[in-house]
Amino acid sequence: MANFLLEIGVEEIPDWMIEPALAELHKRFADAFAAFGGSSITTDATPRRLVLQAKDLIGQAPDVETLVQGPYLSAGEKAAEGFAKKQNTTIDKLSKMTDAKGERYISNQLVKGQVAVHALAEKLPGVITSIPFPKTMYWTGKGGVKFIRPIRWIVALLDDQIIPFEIAGVKSGNITRGHRILGSKAPLLVGINTYAQALRANFVIVSADERKARIEKALGPDVQKDEALLKTLVYLTEFPTPIRGSFDKSYLELPKEILSTVMRHHQRYFSVLNADGSLAPEFVAVTNTDGDPDGLIRQGNEKVLRARFNDARFFWRVDQQKKLSARVADLEKVTFQAKLGSYKDKTERVRVLANEIAKSLNADQNVVDLAALLAKADLTTDMVKEFTELQGIVGGLYAKAQGEGDAVATAIYDHYQPISMDAPIPRTLEGQVVGIADKLDTLREFFRIEMIPTGAKDPFALRRAAQGIVKILFEAKLPLDLKKHIADVPGLLPFMDQRIEFYLKDARGYAYDEINAVVAPGYTTLEDLADRAEAIHAVRPTDNFEPLAASFKRIKNILKQAQLTQANPPKSELLVPGPEQELYQAFLKVRAATQATAVYKEKLAQIASLRPQVDLFFDKILVNDPDPAIRENRLALLHSLLTEFSTIADFSEIVTQGEAK
């Protein structure tokens, strides 16, 4: 068995493209060379190289015997001769088989397994050039190879044997490159066992995990945790070295959010915190060097940050000269979407929606109305024009600074949240109302002009808007009738249902059949839907639940076969003493018990207690009795059972043990 190493040396790859590229490289290699086995396939990367290693590949793929079907004997000898010639054999060496159409010739072919060296040389160019990227470039002329960045070198070794191939004029070999600045200027000769060490000696840490640990170790406990920034820096560097710098305390007069954003988004610096969580006048930059003995890098970073902070302070002071309320009219000049008008138009629509929702949820309508009016005004500020990621946050900070009140400021600050499944929802009811109204308006208007997400394309982030509404309604447990606000827009209701089901599955962890069961009867509020899903999930493991669900499925099928969709209550005088009468009495008792409690778990526990009577009924009673009156009464009893309890969940959707679906 042999080990394999592939390194694709390139110009610097954008950090956010690296991990998806590694996943695709892993998949394509595994698919292309599955026949060669192997104990593991691992990938790693730096900005200048994509690396794959496979261990314990066999030297030659196993032979494969294939059966090729030929013509039927009835087609004549010439057809048989043509088939034999195509298979490089003679008629007398062909076999025969019989199928539904008759007897036919077949050829058993033994395909020799490829030698690993030859297979790798043949397929690797296709594996490499098929890696998808959001954008690619060609550098050898039109029609040439496309890749994310120009390929400069390729290492391809099976043990220490070079796998020979060529891509865009670059021949594979055993030569790599060290760190662009710190490493040797001469090419590095490597073997499969010396690869990582040779690069490390030339200031390249191939392992992303090792680079991450190196950064984390040097950050210190007072540095603000930021996993996303850490990941970015891991893939921006080959030999990361954190360097701590400082800035003038006078900049701390600006809000923490603004200073942190300048450091994080524009300079890729970590913020440093005091013991009380406030911002300290320090930062940590991560450089692609081995140190800063003379402090020149630190001084350079401090100078750049000082200029950025001066810009932010200037924007803050200039923006305060015009209140948010005076900026609302300026939104007329800011386009929301070409077919949907300006942000002023959107603001007016959102105010109407927000006030309507606030009234139904008993939120403070004065706060909601003012927050909805001012929510987008910060789009006209110099601060947001320069730091677009601060929209909403700047509005909240300005509202507070301008005396609009904490409740209004908080609602504006939070109204874009949640921006992802992991992000928090707005902190206050009023912020939740404004956030829902803003997202609802976006969805309603884009669906109205039929700009609906298709496949993976969602340029206006409508799925995120819908998911944000769903997350707020579920997590804040708001009793909002969502359908009331979306049912009049074609296509929007099923779109929202998909987001609801996605949330229940991915965020709450419910099984698909549990979700189907609670969604089937319909819903008014997501709070109620969540309660029913949790109840189903909790009661499901009990002994009686799944057998009863199977019985409900049987009841549903019986009623479907009888074409019974409506029925009067069963007549007690037609019920036969014994299992039938006992089921009816148990039904009345359970119905009364479920009506007496608002807790769905208790309701379901009561319903599950019907199992013995239902089982006995189906064991002893013939539903399709010869007497039409008795038959119709028994169907009416089953109909009552189904309709009374299916308002909680459609139990027939539950997949019971041993059932395939």
Image (cartoon, grey):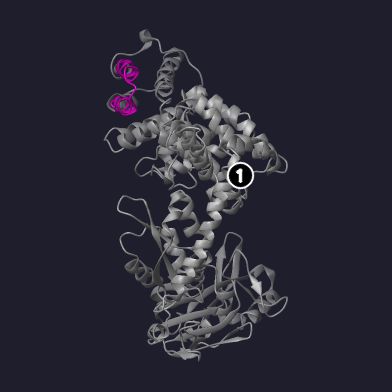
The one nearer the camera, 59 or 99, is: 59
> Over which residues does the magenta segment extend?
585-609
Residue 333: which quarter of the image?
top right
Q: Seen from this angle, which residue lies furthest top?
A: 573
Secondary structure mainly formed by the magenta segment: helix
Query: Which residue position holds label 1?
Result: 379
Judge left or right: residue 463 versus residue 212. right
Camera-nearest residue between 656 and 453 = 453
Residue 424 shown in magenta:
no
For residue 337, above or below residue 44: above
Q: Residues within 10 Å of mark 1 (few under 14, many from 20)?
A: many
User: Which is more toward the observer, 109 or 639?
Assistant: 639
SS label for mark 1: helix
Is residue 554 in view?
no
Up-down: is 564 above or below 512?
Answer: above
Please state the total of marks drawn on the protein image. Answer: 1
Residue 475 image point, x, y percent: 41, 37
* Location of residue 495 by image quarter: top right
Q: What residue appears at the point 43 percent right and 34 percent down from the top-left corner? A: 428
Residue 117: x and y in percent read 49, 86
Q: Quadrant of the C terminus?
A: top left
Residue type at mark 1: give it: Leu
Of 532 and 312, nearer the camera is: 312
Q: Quadrant of the N terminus?
A: bottom left
Expressed as whole percent of the image width and height from the top left, the position of residue 340 reads: 70, 39
Question: Is 478 drawn above or below residue 658 in the view shown?
Answer: above
In this image, 168 relative to 371: left or right? right
Horizontal side of 163 relative to 102 (left or right) equals left
Q: Residue at x 64, y 34 (%)?
A: 490
